[in-house]
Amino acid sequence: MGIAGFTIAVDAMGCDLGPSVVVDGALQASQAHPDVKLLLVGQEDVIKRELAKHKENAQISVLHAPEIITPDEVPTSAIRQKKGSSLVVGLKAVKEGQASGFVSAGSTGALLTGATVIIGRKKGIERPALGTPIPTKKGYTLLLDCGANMDCKPSYLMQFAQIGVEYVEKALGVENPKVGLINVGTEEEKGNAAAKEAYGLLAESGLNFAGNIEGREIPAGAVDVAVCDGFVGNIMLKFMEGLSKTLMGMIKEELMATRISKLGALLAKGALGNIKKRFDYREVGGAPFLGLTSLVVKAHGSSDAFAMKNAIIKCIEFEREGK
């Protein structure tokens, strides 16, 4: 949808830090995009109490959902039993046309299950995948799956590559994106049985398949789309988050050690700030579930208001670009 006037539904109850940061982030996103309506889904009294702390915003409304799905619940059972949850009600709002997209920082498993059952998959896609653009030396590489599907058939990995290529072409403007299959070595015969079969499918797919790649090649920007199962992808993503945070802390500690290094830090402040910004998950905000018939964006469970704002804005941008 490339026009103004659409609505984005937001799960107000799914964030680890509570509904206050979701409401704050929604207000910030609304200020950035005043032509877009936001529908906060959750316990009405709680949301309205949080909204009352801020200046009234006519573009934000509330959809009551009394129940909450917690991260420790079994996804299939939670979706089936808690039909009044903010996650289920929000997804139904998209399905029924009340909203064009849905943003949630709630349980990844429950969001995947709910989105698959309620919204549905695109034709030919067996399982939607969670795709996250990760910073590299050359720009960004789309890593998928990042945690939605722990166990994957070779056909899933093949489909992840297809929807990943489509996304990178449209969202990042990359022509003929290069695809790599994450493995323990670059040779064709490397990996487990699933990886070997997936290699064969990708090699015959007609995609710009670069073969197997090792994890160390991703930061250099060896490929535009890096494919793996959600178990491997989530470990890689969380490791990168932790490593970047630790490295920035170590660099800051060393730069503050002496007067001379402090002077160097002052001179390099802008460059270091830019690098830190590129590796801050809060700047990205959210990752889309690719392969669904409608737009669903997963925000980090521990998102603060800044991250929620960016997740909502990301959803707005996806919708405007027709993703």
Image: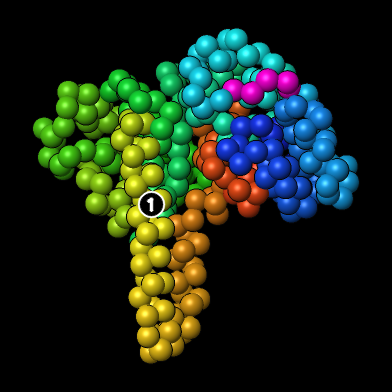
Please report the residue visible at 48 percent of the width from the left and 17 percent of the height from the top.
74
- Which residues are the magenta region? 65-69
Prevalent SS, magenta region: loop
Q: Position of residue 75 (x, y in %)?
A: 50, 18
Q: Which of 131 and 43 lies nearest the eye of the viewer?
A: 43
Q: Position of residue 184 (x, y in %)?
A: 17, 39
Q: Which of 75 and 131 lies nearest the eye of the viewer?
A: 75
Whether residue 317 is visible, yes or no, is: no
Three-letter residue code for mark 1: Gly
Colour scheme of the rendered structure:
rainbow
Q: Position of residue 138 (x, y in %)?
A: 37, 60
Q: Which of 267 and 245 lies nearest the eye of the viewer?
A: 245
Q: Is residue 322 above or below residue 33?
A: above
Please report the residue visible at 13 percent of the width from the left and 34 percent of the height from the top.
190
Q: Residues within 10 Å of mark 1 (few under 14, many from 20)?
A: few
Q: Is residue 98 above or below residue 261?
A: above
Q: In the drawing, does residue 1 fall left or right of residue 50?
A: left
Q: Is residue 83 above or below residue 47?
A: above
Instruction: Look at the image and say whether residue 57 sits in the magenta stretch.
Output: no
Q: Position of residue 279 (x, y in %)?
A: 45, 57
Q: Quadrant of the C terminus?
A: top right
Q: Image quadrant of residue 233?
A: top left
